[in-house]
Image: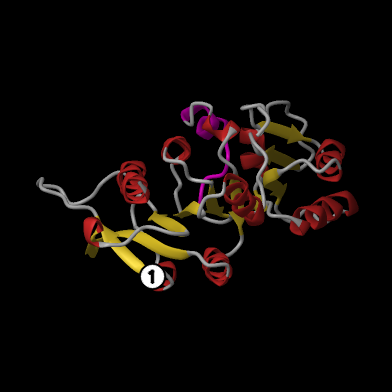
Amino acid sequence: MNEQTINETKIEGRNAVLEAFRAGKTVDKLFVLDGCQDGPVRTIVREAKKGDTILNFVTKERLDQLSETGKHQGVIAITAAYNYVEVDDILEAAKAKGEDPFIVLLDGIEDPHNLGAIIRTANLAGAHGVIIPKHRAVGLTATVAKTSAGALNYTPVAKVTNLVQTMKELKDKGLWFACADMDGEIMYNLNLKGPIGLVIGSEGDGVSRLVKENCDFVASIPMKGQIDSLNASVAMGILAYEIVRQRG
């Protein structure tokens, strides 16, 4: 992948935001003055709904807090620090290397430092890409890019609306899924070879019920200490390298 900027951009003002959408920029979040229904704002909202932009209708006070110019005109857009790819692009990356797909799927990771660390480890473990959900999860912010230590230049990230539906589509293409959960089978007892999706849950709640139900295996990490949970990025790293070990 070509090197890209690590600076997310805040765009303010109706004309500037509309031009960003029309120029094809990846807008992660759009903040709109709640109740504002004039023509230009409706056009901006319509453009946002065409893609994966998260819409937030907020008070003027909140917009004023976010604004760096004081001239937001009721709309502020946050563009991604890096461009997202399609899920098929990740599969193509595996095919180009002649390898079984190895994809990391994240179910609601909200901490940008965790996401950046996961992307960094995914790159080092040879994963072909990372998939994140559109809602209730952090996107590719500047903090994520910095924490990834350059890995975002080489490890593609796709953002999807429905993680379960994406998993079902990938199953049809030959992948199977293992998720991390303390109630699962010890990872050393599982066959983690072949086309695989490794699913890591959120920092607080773990893997959601529907996502877990669509996994083929539930893997647990043996723990000997007095506490019963690992940081999400650490858990991902341990399981990713068990996959590396089994692949040989």
| Residue drawn 61% across the image and 41% down it | 62
Q: Splitting the image into 4 quarters, where does residue 21 fall?
A: top right
The residue located at (64%, 36%) in the rendering is: 82
- Kindly identify the amino acid type of the residue bearing the numbered disc 1: Asp
State left or right for residue 21 relative to residue 60: right
Secondary structure beneath dot 1 equals loop
Across and down, in percent, residue 70 comes to: 73, 28
In the picture shown, does residue 15 fall above or below 90?
above
Q: Residue at coordinates 23% horizontally, 50% vertically from top-left?
A: 229
Say whether residue 21 is visible.
Answer: yes
Magenta residue span: 137-147
> Residue 73 at x, y = what percent?
79, 39
Q: Quadrant of the N terminus?
A: top right
Q: Does 103 lie within the magenta span?
A: no
Residue 105 spot, x, y in % from top left: 48, 54
- The picture places residue 126, in percent across and down from the top left corner, at 46, 41
> Between residues 196 and 48, which one lies in front from this camera angle?
196
Judged from this view, the residue extending furthest toward the right is: 39
- Res 55 seen here: no
User: In this rendering, would 64 be left or right of 201?
Assistant: right
Q: Which of these two is toward me, 75 or 64?
A: 75
Give the residue pinned by disc 1: 216
Dot 1 alpha-carbon crowd within 10 angstroms: few under 14, some 14 to 19, many 20 or more: some
